[in-house]
Image (tube, rainbow, N blue to C red):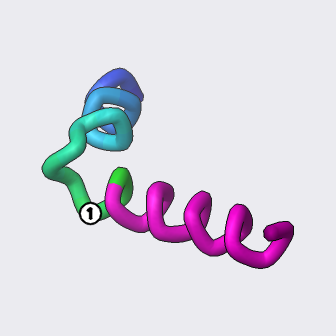
Amino acid sequence: MPGDSVGYLDPRSQSFKQAVADFMTRIEEHG
């Protein structure tokens, strides 16, 4: 759904925040 894509890319959305948190965690794990 286009709405889901927009929501995922929305910096204010929970999905975006979760994606960023997961991304940062992976960076920390790989040093």
Q: Residue at x 70, y 63 (%)?
A: 27
Q: Residue furthest left?
A: 12
Q: Residue at x 57, y 64 (%)?
A: 24
Q: Residue under circle 1? A: 14
Look at the image and give the residue range highlighted in magenta: 17-31
Direction from residue 30 to residue 10 in the image, left or right: left
- Residue 11 location, x and y as percent? 22, 43
Q: Quadrant of residue 6?
A: top left
Q: Residue furthest front?
A: 31
Q: Is residue 21 above or below residue 3?
A: below
The one of 30 and 13 positioned closer to us in this rendering: 30
**The C terminus lies in quadrant:** bottom right
Direction from residue 28 to residue 8 in the image, left or right: left
Please identify the dominant SS of the magenta region.
helix
Label 1 CA crowd tier, 10 Å (few <14, some 14–19, many 20+)? few
Direction from residue 24 to residue 16 in the image, left or right: left
Specify the amino acid type for callout 1: Gln
Q: Is residue 9 above or below residue 29?
A: above
- Residue 26 location, x and y as percent? 72, 67
The one of 24 and 22 positioned closer to us in this rendering: 24
Q: Is residue 4 above or below residue 19?
A: above
Find out whether residue 28 is within the magenta segment: yes
Q: Residue at x 35, y 52 (%)?
A: 16
Q: Is residue 8 above or below residue 18?
A: above
Q: Residue at x 63, y 73 (%)?
A: 25
Q: Quadrant of residue 15?
A: bottom left
